Image (cartoon, rainbow, N blue to C red):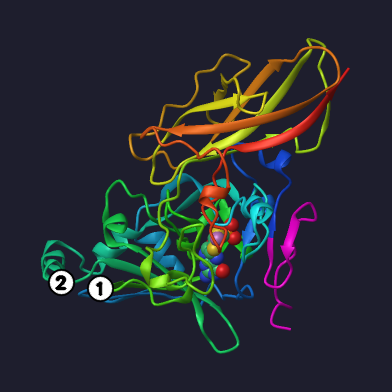
Amino acid sequence: DPYSGDPQRHPVLRVNSAKPFNAEPPPSLLGDSYITPSAIFFKRNHLPVPRVDPASYRLRVEGLPRPLSLSLADLKGRFPKHTVTATLQCAGNRRSEMNAVKQVKGLNWGIAAIGNATWSGALLRDVLREGGWGPEAAAAAAGGGARHVQFEGLDADASGTTYGASIPLNKALSEEGDVLLAYQMNGEDLPADHGYPLRVVVPGTVGARNVKWLGKVIVSREESASHWQQNDYKGFSPGTDWDTVDFKSAPAIQELPVQSAITQPADGAVLERDADGEVTVRGYAWSGGGREVVRVDVSLDGGKTWQVARLREGDGEGEEQGEAPPPPPPPGRAWAWKLWEVVAPLPPGEQQVEIVCKAVDNSYNMQPDSVAPIWNLRGVLSNAWHRVRVTVRE
Ligand code: MTE
Ligand code: MO
């Protein structure tokens, strides 16, 4: 069994697939903490978890004037340690809502294939500079040269094919890109499921490009040739089916669209009003590409009337003590999600209530109101208004 070396997992996780291991936390737990604890952070593996010996591990970096082979000690000692709080979201988050419209192909994710963590490591741009990436290499590249950075994982299938993906070179080189070769998650060594000993963290970019168990970095003219870059993780029209789809016709997903979801109450819950006759609604909101969520609208009547949610900046701790919230992120670098909350009165009497949320980012991108017009055969980019139906009683 190639999966016999997989690590232990937290029992609270909801398992979508055991081999390879794919699981997400219950939504209410996800919405409880600004930083998602690593143990309950969603896990999305395409292959068995590779066992990597940290002593003999080397990261190879190619496609540069000076190719590099770096040990973990090199990565930790020769480059400044950089820390970023960034949200990671799978392209298939909320796929189950697309399945409810019409069957799609893929794991049946709920709303929790997303998490927010603190990542630390070397900046990819610093490592590329060490390999001689500079104005001359860039000038050579301008004559039809490098445009992409490819990443290869150490996880492989029975034929030896490894997981791989790529990102635009511009993102990797940008001083404001914050692309990390991360060896820590939430202040500790990366857990086995999250890429020990090293993974790429590409803030603002779809989960699939954040390659775990990183073995090789290649600066190149072409995108990664891997299945997951070329023939998966792309969006299509609702009218495109498996007989007509042409994967070459669509770009690989990089930045993700604006997203939000309700983590509390759960769909189908029976709620009691609190002593003040109010109910509490909570959720998360995030957008790709470093765009900041500037507003979340919540409706308690299926979308007829709306109120603005309170954005819980940071982890919300200390709010009661009146401490100032953390400073807003620099423009274009809002990598972390925002948790939000609405406390709303409801008229007396038993009733069915449809709660809806939708987020707005700083480019005034908004979520679409329904799933059908954004349905696609692979069930990716599922970001319609999120709706939960609950019963409120006396
Ligand atoms: N990297 C490798 N090497 N193998 C993988 O299967 N899955 C990708 C990405 N990086 C994957 C990978 C996908 S699709 C996602 S959504 C994220 O890892 C999930 O990261 P997580 O398991 O740390 O949450
Ligand atoms: Mo993913």
Query: What's the residue at 57%, 14% (across, down)?
Result: 322
Label 2 sits on what residue type? Gly
- The disc, 2 or 1, on the residue closer to the chain's N-terminal end is 2
Residue of label 1: 221
Is-magenta flag for residue 13? yes
Measure the C-alpha gap from mark 2 to mark 1: 8 Å
Residue of label 2: 144
Q: Quadrant of the C terminus?
A: top right
Give the image location of residue 379, x and y in percent. Answer: 57, 58
Is label 2 in contact with label 1 (beta carbons under 8 Å)?
A: yes
- The local secondary structure at tag 1 comes to loop
The relative height of residue 197 versus residue 329 in the rendered view (above or below) is below
Give the image location of residue 363, x and y in percent. Answer: 36, 35
The relative height of residue 150 versus residue 208 in the rendered view (above or below) is below
Q: Is residue 29 left or right of residue 165?
A: right
Pick the front one: 295 or 98: 98
Label 1 sits on what residue type? Arg
Residue range (magenta): 1-22
